[in-house]
Amino acid sequence: VFFELVVARTLQILGGQIEVELPVKETNRRPDFCARFDDETITVEATVPELNRATGKQMEWNEELVEIVETLTPSGWTVLVLRLPNIGPNDSKREFKRAIAQAFRTIPPNPPSDATPLEIGGFDDELYLTLLPGRSGKRAAAARGMVAGADDTESRIRAAVTYKKRQVRKSVTPVVLAISASPFGGLDDFDQALYGLTFETVDHEGKTIQTGFKPTGLFGIPRPEAPTVAAVLAYRSVGFTEATDPVLYLHPRFTGLLPESLMKLEVRSLDAAGIQTRTARAKNILDALNSVVWRQ
């Protein structure tokens, strides 16, 4: 819902008048927005694919442990939580809390700035903390538990586009899908999911003999019919304290027109040579959102 609000305000900032969940006559589906601009009208559907589910869940679990570490960290120290034991949300935290309290008991508060950093381990090497003298902000933890795992951002963007086609099919105006890949995704993920990959061929001596682009993305598949989706509005970072301007990815088979104000964003397109990028003519438009400013 928060992302839908950001998308709605993006359309308004760009000059659109929006109506919410107007039904598509032939399917009775209700895409999120109909946005009417002075020159064109578009249908917009917003979605936030669940990225890196296992990694995100582990980060949530870790946060409970980090909060325990922060609560017990002596004043005047900053803690880097680099590794944490695998303790789930329903597991007892009593032993973990006791171990942290025991480890911190002999550490003096308010150390001199040149004090030696301290390393703390335990739980069969599953726990690894580093204490640094000084504290720059209110929070004690500067690093909050490292989590590793396979990145599925590209595949989840692909799945989101495919799934949302059902919601917008038969729309009488050009369709733009607004997709948030925050906080994990970047434009490389959108490039690969929508357009494809660059490649390089080398011979047996390691000499490059060919370079090019393979249109393996969803928008790169050659088909005779007009596409259901005219473009994707890609958001890389969306939150209460930040929302970066989105990037517009045009479908190469879309031959219609989109609002000129939308085309003032950074625009990416696909041709035989690969991905082409046109620099944004309107920048920092989402400053108008007046996001929360975090001051320490």
Image: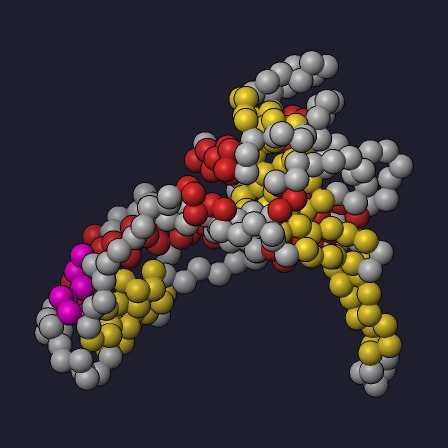
Q: Position of residue 34 (x, y in %)?
A: 60, 25
Task: Pick the quarter of the image with the N terminus.
Answer: top left
Residue range of the region highlighted in magenta in the rendering: 70-77
Q: Quadrant of the C terminus?
A: bottom left
| Whether residue 49 is situated above or below residue 293 in the rendered picture | above
User: From this viewpoint, is residue 138 visible?
Assistant: yes
Q: Which color mode does the image show? A: secondary structure
Side of 179 relative to 4 (left or right):
right
> Is residue 27 on the magenta stretch?
no
Q: Quadrant of residue 230?
A: top right
For the point 68% across and 46% down, which residue is it? 249
How far across and down, in percent of the image, does residue 278 sit?
A: 68, 55
Q: Would residue 99 be seen by someone viewing this image from the given angle? A: no
The residue at the point 54 percent across, 44 percent down is: 180
Question: Residue 104: where, in percent of width, then height?
Answer: 16, 68
Q: Position of residue 85 (x, y in %)?
A: 35, 60
The residue at the point 62 percent across, 29 percent down is 38
Instruction: Decide if residue 158 is on the left or right side of residue 82.
Output: right
- Please identify the residue farthest to the front as the structure is shown: 38
